[in-house]
Image (cartoon, helix red, strand yellow):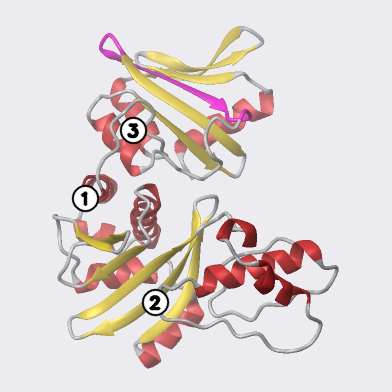
Amino acid sequence: MAQLDKLLSVMIQKGAEALYLDEDQPSTLKLEGQDAPLTKALNGQQVVGLLKEIAPPQASAHLDQKAPVKFQYTNGQGVFLVRAMLQGDKWHCQLTVDDKGEFERRTGMFRAVDMETPSVAEALAAANAVAIAAAAAAAPAAAQAASDPDRARMRMEKLLRVLVDVGGSDLHLRVGEPPIIRKSGEMTRVEGEKLTASEGEVLLAAIMPDRNKKEFAEHNDTDFAYEIEGVARFRANVLKDRKGIAAVFRVIPSNIVTADQLGVTSEVQKLCYLTKGLVLVTGPTGSGKSTTLCALVDLVNRSRSDHVITIEDPIEFVHEN
């Protein structure tokens, strides 16, 4: 649980308009036009530390550069809009409930408003730097940080968030290589620290279901789905190659593309109204089989009053009842 979650909880409970974090000032709620202090005065390092605990990688990088930053944060209490900047030489930060939908409702998604969007390599390098710095600060030794499942999960999620941020389709992890992102068919190897065998095992074990840990131990291969709520679902394949553990994560978009948006012809759409029979959707890897099936199941779900069952391993697109 992030430290700021406690302050945001008070903000929600009291129905405050905003939460302010100002350097050399107490954290303050704006409540019915009045300021209500919550804590003792915060120094600049404390303000930045609170923000970096909840900031996505690109936003965290901007904080390190002392640049203005604006991002969305989601927890179990709601969706919050975070703005921070230096005024003079002191940090000023405002957190408000994002009830106007100023950002897409995607957990931790950072929009570089009026800022230059970093490249894939820059974004992933920033994520690695933030994760490494956080691990070093939280534990007295690197070995302790590497063995912390929660910290490993956070680092893994930072990499997946960056994959979504830059519009990539796949994240590749392999022992002896830095993380690799596939975007528009092009592979970008990020310069930086290479993944060691022990790091790879800890990172992947932190997000792997127990059933898949057992399957991987027996067969050196397993498939599962992983979801960061509000960001995306990811289809994961974890395997062993000659160098050790490896993994590929494919982004499954949160928003379902409809048959019309996908350009599925009316003749194919009519298949969704059949009451008997078998329809096969075939094609090579990456040709769009899953996306096409998703659009057709969505059409059935929206247009028929029937019980729809999908059998998947892992579950990819999620259709609401």
* Residue under numbered circle 3: 49
Q: Amino acid at mark 1?
A: Ala
Describe the element under mark 2 as helix, strand or loop. Answer: strand
Task: Specify few, some or many for label 1: CA neighbours under 10 Å numbering under 14, 14-19, or 20 or more.
Answer: some
- The residue shown at (40%, 52%) is 164
Q: Amino acid at mark 2?
A: Asn
Q: CA distance from mark 3 to mark 1?
A: 24 Å
**Which region shows up in magenta?**
87-100
Q: Position of residue 304 (x, y in %)?
A: 82, 68
Circle nearer the N terminus (3, 1): 3
Q: CA distance from mark 2 to mark 3?
A: 34 Å
Q: Position of residue 17 (x, y in %)?
A: 61, 18
Circle nearer the N terminus (2, 1): 1
Q: Position of residue 119 (x, y in %)?
A: 24, 45
Principal SS element in the magenta part? strand
* Residue 99 among magenta residues: yes
Q: Position of residue 65 (x, y in %)?
A: 22, 29
Q: Describe residue 66's horizontal placement relative to residue 70 as left or right.
A: left
- The residue shown at (53%, 39%) is 104
Q: Which mark is residue 121?
A: 1
Describe the element under mark 1 as helix, strand or loop. Answer: helix
Task: Specify few, some or many for label 2: CA neighbours under 10 Å numbering under 14, 14-19, or 20 or more.
Answer: some
- The residue shown at (14%, 55%) is 192
Describe the element under mark 3 as helix, strand or loop. Answer: helix
